[in-house]
Image: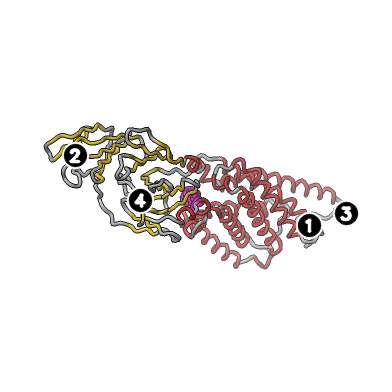
Amino acid sequence: MSDMLPGQPDSGVAAGGGNRNSAWILRYKSKWFFAILLTPVFAAISSLWWVINGDWSPFLRTTILFEAVTLFLPAANCVLQSGRKHKTLLILGGAFLAGMIACALAFPLVTSQVNRKCPIHYLLSGSVYLILFYGAYLLHVRNRFCFAIRFLLFILAAILGYVFFYLPSIEGADMLLLVLIASPLEALSIALFLDYLFSRLNPSAVQPSEKKKGIFRRILIGIVYGFIGLIALCSFSMQSEGILQLEKEPAFLLKHVSDPSVIRTLSGKLESFSAILEFTPGAAPLMTLLPPSNEDDKKISSPDDSIRVNHENDRLSFTYKDKKPLYTLKTSGYTRFIWNGSEFLCRDMKNWHLLTFHGDAPPVVRTLHADALCPTPGKQAVFYALDNVFFLEEKDSSPRMIYSAKPFFASIQTRYSPLAVAFTPDFRYIFYECFRRSYLKGGNTLFIFETDTNKVFIYERFGRRPAHLPSLRPLQWKEKK
């Protein structure tokens, strides 16, 4: 390659050469300055989903990365026109450092817990982006690609960088597919930015070979644009980007935080309203879905038909064999209830109510403010969860805290809504079924906390996600004998 950049004038030996050099330098500086000013526009396009949703920090981070790409271009051009050996290695090495510095500057703006928990990967993602971008640029300089091939090369570089950026959250084929589907919007904006920067805004840009022009070029451009348009139309990148942001942290937790050693010695089965999850030491949990049913929600009679419920005007009236009044419960707002043997579980807008019946005697009544509740079989005690803290309340005693999962849930951004809770007799394991928004995975999320080690095992797609309101039926843990 010549020591002189394409487009640079001769040294000015001839008359007027000095003026030509001055004009070329002025044009070079003006184009480079314009490229710096134009960079935020492409960054805004690349971060469009975030900007629409009112979050400007991704736009600022992308701007820093794009400015690094722009500011490194004069150095890359300087190396290309020099007589040094190993030009490719020098340029890619410089791109590696520039990308890492850019991400280090952008790191204080990071809001994602996934990136904050993997800072080294975040720094390396900037390096990978710039290596891919300048690798594509070097290929273009050496081969003098036409626009169609050059643009396709930049798209490929952007997609590969996008996949690497989300690597910590890719725990399966479905997440990889989602990342690929969500990538076109960013890839297209990056490809436009790189093409403008490396060709139109670059005073040292190389021109395509004359042999690569003509009808073949027009056909290829049509094919490329048709392919890109089809991808952009079918991928729904904007919607996919939103889904990706919902799914990336749960996938990261499943891949990096969930500890299989928690259930290594667990033996028994966990029953919910829609599934049975069986645990065998040394084996993966085995889930069996139960047939859909209408449950016992709003069933007015106890299982033995001895006690009937009459629901009227925020009052639940209980009678024994339609003759003897037993109790009247006042509720607040919308009320749901089920029978669990001789126990009556009721949840209104504020509290849980647990009524335990013994023949025709008035029931033992407990009212609790809780997110999820589990009666203790054979004992007059209730195990419940409130604000991700687990308590045991025994008869005539104050609630006793068993375990707090607050630090775990405070460290993540995904919002989980509690549905049900259960425990092993020694409280070594706590089972916590939660719901989260998800477009990929059916079922709910089951957290299994090992209380003496603070480890957690996460099981996705537990049971069947209810079509409307979640079930009130408690989780039940049964030890294997």
Q: Mark 2 points at which residue?
A: 309
Residue 472 in the image: above or below residue 133 = above
Is residue 179 something that shows in the picture? yes
The answer to which of marks 3 and 2 sits earlier in the sequence is: 3
Q: Mark 1 points at which residue?
A: 81
Q: Name the residue nearer the viewer: 405 or 17.
A: 405
Residue 464 % position (x, y): 34, 53
**What stretch of residues is rendered in magenta?**
242-254
Secondary element at image label 2: strand
The answer to which of marks 1 and 2 sits earlier in the sequence is: 1
Between disc 1 and disc 4, the foreground one is 4
Q: Quadrant of residue 343 in the image?
A: top left
Residue 245 % position (x, y): 49, 48
- Mark 1–mark 2 distance (CA, rounded to whole Å): 89 Å
The answer to which of marks 1 and 3 sits earlier in the sequence is: 3
- The three-letter amino acid code for the residue at tag 1 is Gln
- The three-letter amino acid code for the residue at tag 3 is Val
